[in-house]
Image: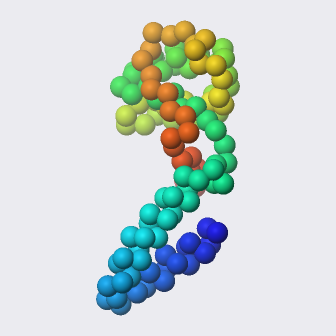
Amino acid sequence: MFLALCLRLVIAITNFERGDDPGREKLKRIDSEYKSILQSDACKAETNFIFDLEGASAETAAAFAQRLREHKTISLRRETPNGFPRRTDPFDYSTLSTDVEYELKTDDMVFVDFIGE
């Protein structure tokens, strides 16, 4: 399914580069189809919790991570320009007691692994 979608995208881009106006409409349609397919349950590979600590200091994030480890293993942590997201497997987060403000994100994200240096 994914390869067929990629092939349709390449054809649409080629037509667009050749000045084919319907290619532009095809490209818009393919973009919306791609997003629709990604959001389907068939593409759901895993369920994760992301605890997003926007604007927190490194010390605050470390203290939060320590509290979080009491409940679940942190499977991914990154320092970003906007904060310190922490990814875990799902658990009963109502038992997590902390003074740190966080935004909990569940299935509203597509998880893409970074490949590179």
User: In the shown orientation, is residue 66 left or right of residue 11?
Assistant: right
Q: Quadrant of the N terminus?
A: bottom right
Residue 106: percent from the left, percent from the top?
55, 34
- Residue drawn 54% across and 47% down? 110
Residue 43: percent from the left, percent from the top?
63, 54
- Residue drawn 55% across and 56% down? 38
Q: Nearer the viewer, residue 60 or 47?
A: 47
Could you say which quadrant of the image residue 55 lies in?
A: top left
Residue 52: percent from the left, percent from the top?
46, 29
Could you say which quadrant of the image residue 4 lies in?
A: bottom right
Residue 107: percent from the left, percent from the top?
56, 39
As drawn, 82 above or below 64:
below
Q: Is residue 17 visible?
A: no
Q: How many marks?
A: 0
- Residue drawn 43% across and 70% down? 29
- Residue drawn 49% across and 58% down? 35
User: In the shown orientation, is residue 12 left or right of residue 94?
Assistant: left
As drawn, 82 above or below 29:
above
User: In the shown orientation, is residue 30 left or right of residue 17?
Assistant: right
Could you say which quadrant of the image residue 57 lies in?
A: top left
As drawn, 33 above or below 21:
above
As drawn, 10 above or below 61:
below
Q: Nearer the viewer, residue 26 or 56?
A: 26
Q: Is residue 104 visible?
A: yes
Q: How is the image coloured?
A: rainbow
Q: Nearer the viewer, residue 28 or 109?
A: 28
